[in-house]
């Protein structure tokens, strides 16, 4: 494999002089930011999940597990939907995104940057407008489905909006750049001479891809999957605009609990259950793909 | 003419904010002094740095014996979008109004010399209030001077002591011109804290073409919605509207004082079969659904379909009755420019101004005399039943906004179950 | 990377004179698929652009009515819209720069060094992505308000009233994770011998980093910056909580759609898209020409 760190006798560099503290120095600014503006607020939210009361009257931290019990028992279908739609969206974005990233990385030439930018530029515009545009396009009598119905390919009552398909399509579309960019980043780094060497050793195109390119692209696959699956699990807006009452995800439940019902304990508990589930999934996934290469 | 929309600068804390507003006020004073075209009487100087205790030039035409404090600014006014009159291209072409401005706000600035920072940031009640709740709980100023919230949320704000008490001597127009139907709300009987901005109605909307194409008779009752294929019907994400109309359908009077949780359960059980057959809940996305012929009939709000629906989309006042709701002006506790906010409330209750707003917004004005004034602006609007509902409709209007905590919790729980969350 | 391009073109052309049909189809399939995929990504932009020329029947731009240039002639017709757009762009630029820097440093540390707490920090990085945005927003707002209340008031710099600076803080926070994950994908399997070689040739740490490491990981950093920018410029929920009285373009869009959907949204969206793509196209053309001229 590519990364074989050759250990030489250490030179008296800045790094060795600072010794073991150097990585901490690199970490410090970003970690400080995260601790201050993520960890501390998250701890506050966690205390809500084990409290009783209301925001007007004040919460008392009673260390009760009621919120977690309610969270785990009442929302099976929504958790299932999150895993289902999040997982499917990840697989679809991978299937669509990998060839695109490969094409840009290997055959993009001087236009690599432009192509990459074209992948992400649509997402500088408002999510709402993109979704409304899709709804205009996919309307039952719109420019796409209307003609298909006119020539009889689709039944007259066919309506794809507010179905599981449209929700999945929305998730897939909106997370596609999050899969393509990390994939590109990993693929573009692959030294083409390795592929050439494999072909010199009588591998055909397909075998070279399978035995050289694919394994080297795994860090990109891992990163892209994370950047897609993790936020998709917590997504609520695609279900709200493109789904129906049967396809709601856990993000919608959390939204409802916090905003409408002002039920901070259960809302926070659900969030932490979601975060725990995601961490476990990521851990298993990393193991499956082989952590050594992936997390550096 | 000074641009009424202030640029939001970098927030540097309260001290800098006051300095900035003082500077802005001074700038407005200079602008006012260099001659504005509209106000006949001299505009009062906005305080140039000194606020409390400064005596000022005489203000509006109604002279008072005691010196009135000068209004401070800029006024931070949070409102729902498209809820105030807006400059038309014609106005811009003739240079009467700058692009993107509102005649009401421009006139207010001309009259009082205070800029208005008008932000259309309220998309729905809970989301907006969640952003100011921590400040209110902690007794800090929210940054807003004036906000517009629907009845039930306004009631909560007042009940929690988060609204400033109004000075009747400043809001004279409001006291005099509020329509009787909107007086004596249970949650603020004396109008000590709020005055309505606009009212709206919830009823039934349907598409005539879809109905005739599919052999359905035009709906006249809420119950007719149950007879349309459920995947072609939408109800509202606003639980109070949906439950209110559904209670009417079941023959129950949606009076928050008499409704029981069992009756709410009845509503839930009545709607659940429809959800299983494809009923959805929308906000005003129903407009797009109507436009695409995906929805044939729905629970709708009065303003939307009238102003923006297709020609064959009609609003119906159902036989059983309609829901009425009101969006109300409130001053959050700790507002920096409370006096200016009260002046704004007073300003929009002047019938010509109220007519101007209602003509654009196309909702029900709370101001007495707006009906007469609007005839001068737009004769059609004066006879439009959506702006000025006829008496028989008014008699059957129900308000299901202010609920007890128990009722509200039950309703939210049942509605969440229907909506799949 | 010019070397890679030359090599890739060499490989592509190094086959037999007449490749079998399947190989020729295979060679075409990829560009065609990519073109289709990029077209797919563009579809809503096309619809948005087309509808920017619509004169809607009422207040909502949902259905095509008639052609009109009104939107383009009066793009900033709504009160506060121009301020909101400027604020959004400014925050996106600033938060991208900051988050990319902080995130790259973290990525470097996590990828290359083994230290105590590495696993925990690896896990910590994923958490902001896993947390629902509404939780991030509400909890941050509580924190900001708390800096103005006892017991914290006075002892920490106050972050209340919320506004531009608190939006910036929030955006940097949630962007860091995305940058770290993207940069690590680039750093995985980074060949340290290149650095060792440079140092053997007399370069010090800093020179090595700037002349060897940084150019090699630059694509990863750029990709991370692009992701961060797009996340920031379209963020609604978190921004809504921590923006106070400041308005941003996404908040404006989400708020306004309750009562109207003006053509101006399409116009602004189109302007943003074309300006961004145009700028990159120009720089790409110029650098392409430079390579050819060498």
Image (spheres, rainbow, N blue to C red):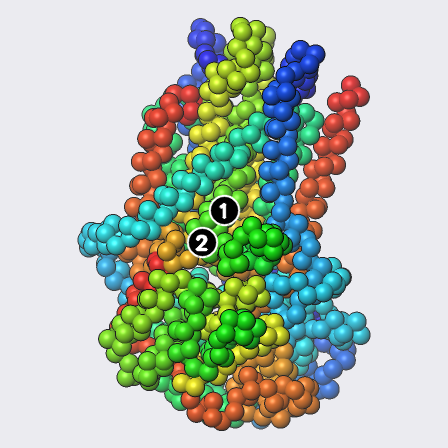
Residue A206 percent across, percent down from the top left: 52, 18
Q: How crowded is mark 2: few (under 14 residues within 10 Å), some or many (20 or more)?
A: some
SS for callout 1: helix
Q: Mark 2 points at which residue?
A: A163
At a point 54% along the width and 71% down the height, the residue shown is B213
Q: What element carries label 2?
A: loop
Considering only order in the chain, which callout, 2 or 1, is on the residue closer to the N terminus? 2
Q: Give the total of numbered labels.
A: 2
Which chain is indicated by disc 2? A
Residue at left 29%, top 76%? B404
Query: Which chain is home to disc 1?
Result: A
Q: In this view, does A6 lie above or below A221?
A: above
The N terminus of chain B lies in quadrant: bottom right
Residue A25, horizontal then vertical, whole percent: 44, 28
Residue bearing mark 1: A169
Q: Can residue B367 be seen in this view?
A: no
């Amino acid at each position: 494999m590519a990364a074989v760190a050759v250990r030489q006798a250490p030179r008296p560099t800045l790094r060795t002089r600072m010794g073991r503290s150097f990585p901490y120095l690199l970490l410090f600014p970003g970690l400080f930011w995260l601790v201050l503006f993520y960890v501390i607020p998250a701890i506050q939210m966690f205390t809500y999940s084990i409290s009783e009361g209301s925001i007007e009257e004040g919460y008392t931290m009673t260390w009760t597990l009621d919120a977690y019990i309610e969270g785990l028992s009442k929302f099976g279908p929504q958790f299932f939907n999150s895993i289902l739609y999040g997982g499917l969206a990840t697989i679809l974005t991978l299937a669509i995104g990998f060839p695109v990233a490969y094409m840009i990385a290997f055959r993009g030439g001087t236009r690599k940057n432009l192509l990459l930018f074209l992948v992400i530029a649509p997402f500088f515009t408002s999510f709402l407008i993109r979704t409304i545009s899709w709804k205009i396009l996919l309307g039952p009598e719109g420019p796409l489905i209307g003609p298909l119905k006119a020539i009889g390919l689709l039944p007259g009552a066919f309506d794809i909006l507010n179905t599981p398909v449209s929700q999945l399509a929305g998730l897939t579309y909106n997370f596609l750049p999050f899969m393509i960019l990390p994939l590109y980043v990993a693929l573009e780094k692959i030294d083409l001479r390795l592929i050439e060497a494999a072909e010199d050793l009588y591998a055909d195109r397909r075998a070279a891809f399978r035995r050289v390119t694919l394994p080297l692209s795994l860090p990109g696959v891992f990163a892209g999957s994370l950047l897609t699956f993790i936020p998709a699990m917590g997504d609520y807006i695609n279900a709200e605009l493109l789904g129906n009452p049967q396809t709601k995800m856990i993000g919608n439940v959390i939204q409802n609990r916090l905003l409408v019902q002002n039920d901070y304990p259960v809302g926070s508990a659900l969030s932490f259950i979601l975060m725990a589930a995601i961490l476990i999934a990521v851990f298993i996934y990393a193991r499956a793909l082989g952590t050594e290469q992936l997390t550096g | 003419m000074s641009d009424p929309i202030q640029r939001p600068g970098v927030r540097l804390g309260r001290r800098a904010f006051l300095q900035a507003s003082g500077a802005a006020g001074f700038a407005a004073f200079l602008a006012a002094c260099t001659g504005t075209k509209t106000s006949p009487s001299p505009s009062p100087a906005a305080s140039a740095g000194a606020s409390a205790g400064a005596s000022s030039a005489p203000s509006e035409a109604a002279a008072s014996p005691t010196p009135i404090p000068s209004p401070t600014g800029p006024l931070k006014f949070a409102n729902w979008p498209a809820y105030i009159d807006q400059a038309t291209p014609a106005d811009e072409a003739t240079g009467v109004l700058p692009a993107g401005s509102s005649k009401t706000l421009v006139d207010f600035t001309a009259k009082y010399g205070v800029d208005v920072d008008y932000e259309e940031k309220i998309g729905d009640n809970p989301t907006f209030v969640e952003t100011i709740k921590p400040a209110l709980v902690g007794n800090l100023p929210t940054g807003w001077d004036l906000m517009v919230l629907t009845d039930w949320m306004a009631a909560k704000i007042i009940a929690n002591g988060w609204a400033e008490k109004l000075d009747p001597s400043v809001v004279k127009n409001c006291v005099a011109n509020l329509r009787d139907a909107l007086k004596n709300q249970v949650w603020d009987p004396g109008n000590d804290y709020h005055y309505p901005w606009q009212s709206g109605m919830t009823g039934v909307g349907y598409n005539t073409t879809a109905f005739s194409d599919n052999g359905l008779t035009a709906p006249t009752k809420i119950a007719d919605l149950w007879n349309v294929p459920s995947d072609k019907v939408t109800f509202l994400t606003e639980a109070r509207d949906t439950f209110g109309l559904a209670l009417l359908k079941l023959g129950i009077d949606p009076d928050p004082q008499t409704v029981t949780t069992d009756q709410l359960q009845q509503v839930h059980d009545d709607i659940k079969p429809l959800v299983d057959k494809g009923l959805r809940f929308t906000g005003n996305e129903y407009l797009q659904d109507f436009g695409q012929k995906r929805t044939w009939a729905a629970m709708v709000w009065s303003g939307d379909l009238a102003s923006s629906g297709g020609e064959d989309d009609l609003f119906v006042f159902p036989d059983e009755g309609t829901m009425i709701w009101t969006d109300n002006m409130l001053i959050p506790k700790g507002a920096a420019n409370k006096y200016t906010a009260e002046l704004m409330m007073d300003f929009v209750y002047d019938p010509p101004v109220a007519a101007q707003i209602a003509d654009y917004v196309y909702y029900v004005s709370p101001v007495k005399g707006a009906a007469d004034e609007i005839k001068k602006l737009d004769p059609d609007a004066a006879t439009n039943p959506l702006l000025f509902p006829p008496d028989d409709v008014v008699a059957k209007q129900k308000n299901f906004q202010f609920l007890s905590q128990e009722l509200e919790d039950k309703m939210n729980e049942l509605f969440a179950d229907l909506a799949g969350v | 990377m010019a070397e890679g391009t030359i090599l890739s073109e060499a490989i592509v052309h190094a086959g037999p004179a007449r490749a079998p049909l399947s190989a020729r189809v295979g060679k075409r399939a990829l560009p065609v698929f990519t073109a289709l995929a990029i077209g797919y990504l563009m579809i809503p932009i096309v619809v948005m652009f087309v509808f920017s020329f619509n004169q809607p029947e009422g207040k909502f731009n949902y259905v095509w009515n008639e052609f009109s240039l009104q939107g383009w002639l009066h793009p900033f017709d709504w009160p506060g819209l121009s301020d909101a757009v400027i604020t959004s762009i400014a925050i996106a630029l600033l938060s991208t720069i900051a988050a990319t820097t902080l995130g790259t440093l973290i990525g470097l540390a996590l990828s290359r060094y083994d230290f105590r707490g590495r696993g925990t920090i690896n896990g910590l990085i994923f958490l902001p992505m896993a947390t629902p945005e509404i939780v991030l927003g509400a909890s941050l707002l509580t924190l900001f308000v708390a800096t103005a209340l006892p017991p914290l008031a006075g002892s920490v710099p106050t972050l209340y009233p919320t506004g531009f600076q608190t939006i910036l803080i929030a955006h940097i926070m949630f962007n860091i994770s995305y940058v770290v994950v993207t940069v690590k994908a680039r750093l995985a399997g980074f060949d340290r011998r290149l650095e060792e070689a440079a140092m053997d040739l007399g370069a010090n740490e800093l020179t090595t980093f700037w002349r060897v490491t940084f150019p090699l990981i630059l694509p990863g950093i750029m990709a991370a910056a692009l992701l961060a920018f797009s996340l920031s410029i379209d963020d609604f929920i978190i921004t809504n909580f921590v923006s106070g009285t400041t308005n941003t373009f996404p908040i404006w869009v989400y708020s306004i759609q309750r009562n109207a959907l003006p053509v101006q949204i399409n116009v602004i969206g189109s302007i943003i898209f074309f300006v961004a793509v145009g700028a990159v196209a120009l720089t790409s053309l110029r650098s392409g020409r430079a390579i050819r001229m060498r």
